[in-house]
Image: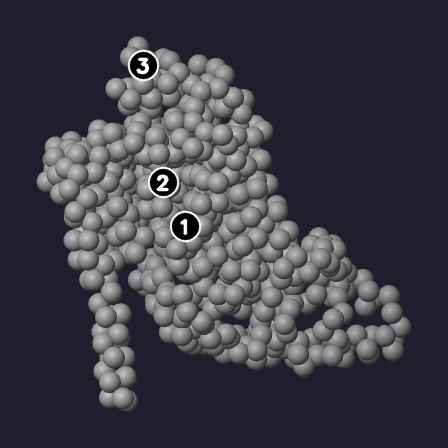
Amino acid sequence: MRLEAAARMDLFRKLWKARKLIVVVFIPLSLLPLPLIHPTSEACCAYVLIVTAVYWVSEAVPLGAAALVPAFLYPLFGVLKSSEVAAEYCKDTTLLLMGVICLAASIEKWNLHKRIALRMVMIAGAKPGMLVLGFMCCTVFLSMWLSNTSTTAMVMPIAEAVLQQLICTGLVDSHDENDSETAEPPEDEGSASGSVTTGGEAFSDKEDDLKKNQLELLYRNDSDCTARLGSALSETGEANGLSLKPISTQDYTKHTNGHMAQVEVVIPNVKRVRARRDSQYPTKKDHMICKCLSLSITYAATIGGLITITGTSTNLIFAEQFNTRYPEAKVINFGTWFIFSFPIAIIMLILTWLWLHFLFLGCNFRETCSLSKKRKTRREMLSERRIHEEYAKLGPISYPEVVTGVFFILMTLLWFTREPGFVPGWTSLFEKKGYRTDATVSVLLGFLLFLIPARRPFSSSSSSSCKDTDDNSEADPLAPMITWKDFQKLMPWEIVILVGGGYALAAGCKVSGLSVWIGRQLEPMSGLPPWAVTLLACLLVSAVTEFASNPATLTVFLPILSALSETLHINPLHTLIPSTMCVSFGVMLPVGNPPNAIVFSYGHVQISDMVKAGFGVNLIGVAVVMLAITTWGVPLFNLTEFPAWAVARNVTGSL
């Protein structure tokens, strides 16, 4: 019996290891009777859609590889010609993304993102509540223009340095019984000591000696803390099934030329994670601060990605699929999306900060958010000093940073003023209308970054204008702001192919009539009010995206929700926009999205912490999005009536 049980367990173990191969082979074969028994265009398209969706959700093959399934199955089943499918894989949004990545590469290469982040944190201060809010604000701002993953990878090392300063200071303070007392600001110490008697002066000297000894102990332990940070990260990474490779300061300077260090992160399996030892945190409060700050960064990156069309890949997927399905609808552009989503982000930012503060820091906002210098502890003052030192290392703002900032502002202004709606945009200056889009602006400015020299023109000193250039640019005075290698390093080609696969699926559903058939099956829901349909769609999408990738989830649901809206005679924007936003709320598990995995890899939080905090953020997001679509979204997108462009699409589809 034991031998049989052992053999059975060994068989199960082998099957589990080969589970992805089994899914890849078994799913297409088991569904093959569908197009063979019902050889219609709808059945063939449904077969391709189901196979691709299963591959995406199960991640049996890489997402980009699964997105290529329609490229060969549609022509084989006669749904679309090969040339028609190929045309779907490169759209206007692909060029828009490429232009934005050029700007992101320049921002990252010249450390403009680090300057912005440190400046915002310096303004916020070192009080725990304000520190968390400061990091959240800078993360939201950066995530508007960079990908959520890149933003999290950029900000987390800065946050980790501040957290380690707090932890190291706490280890020193554990030997001081007066740790709870607040420290006076430096400028007040001189006046205070000068106004006391001789006995007070002697006491002040003893206190100064004590502080001096403590500071010496603190700085003596700096190297130990750094070493402990590296070992803790590597230990936690191995325990979590992650690969995190911290880079030392020397290697950082030598191999990256001051650019942002690349941190390789593998999304972990969902399993119980060994908690950090309590001894690594001086007090429970320190551990709570580490948890709160770590989680706030990944949530802020998600919130910031909602604000702009280019903020996250799901926004791009929605914009392209919507414009392809409803070409007569001229309602979705950078300006209208920003006007709708910016209030959502502000409300979510405040509510998420309050939720995390309540969950990890308690409700004493006066203690954690005071801006008074007299209420700062010595630890907080040392943390502020550390942040100022990091900012001072950047030196004065360089010429490439100025050029990047100008391009950043110029791209934003051109996007806003292209077709603002309430006044004629700059496109009205051209005779032919409809030829210029947001992609035109981003590609033009991105192209110029390959041409503009990174050194100040007519500059006698190369170091004054370009302190972070590599060896090639030092040899070449006309070296551009970015090179193709800089662009290639950040360009997410897998996302481009994934988005293209979504466009191909949508085109197949449209040509075959599958979307119309799905809409007819959903007619029993016609008795529900529009807000109820939207709420059900948001809850369904939010649940699915916790276990599947955000782009794959949205790509599967968009055609279904479009058909549902047309069948129920609801403005498609009423369901599509909230669903697009809610698909980003996969924040409860490390596998929900890459920013979650990056934060999880630092080891401050456990899965239970992410589930508890993420559930509240999920509810906040759905509630705020529903509030937006039923209030200011109604006049902005004219949601009270079924639009003419949707009527024309519905009639054409029925024919």
Q: Which residue is mark 3?
A: 433
Give the amino acid type for the residue marked by disc 1 in the picture.
Val
Q: Which residue is mark 2?
A: 557
3 or 1: tag closer to the N-terminus: 3
On the picture, is 348 further left or further right than 175? left
Question: Residue 10, located in which quarter of the rendered image?
Answer: bottom left
Position above or below: 369 against 230 = above
Looking at the image, the residue that sits furthest to the bottom is 2
Residue 562: percent from the left, percent from the top?
37, 31
2 or 3: tag closer to the N-terminus: 3
Q: Which residue is mark 1?
A: 544
Q: Which residue is nearer to you in this view: 80 or 466?
A: 80
The answer to whether residue 514 is visible is: yes
Residue depicted at 32% across the width and 42% down the height: 556
Give the amino acid type for the residue marked by disc 3 in the picture.
Lys
Q: CA distance from mark 2 to mark 3?
A: 32 Å
Q: Secondary structure at mark 3?
A: loop
Residue 489: percent from the left, percent from the top?
28, 51
Give the amino acid type for the residue marked by disc 2 in the picture.
Phe
2 or 1: tag closer to the N-terminus: 1
Position above or below: 590 against 54 = below
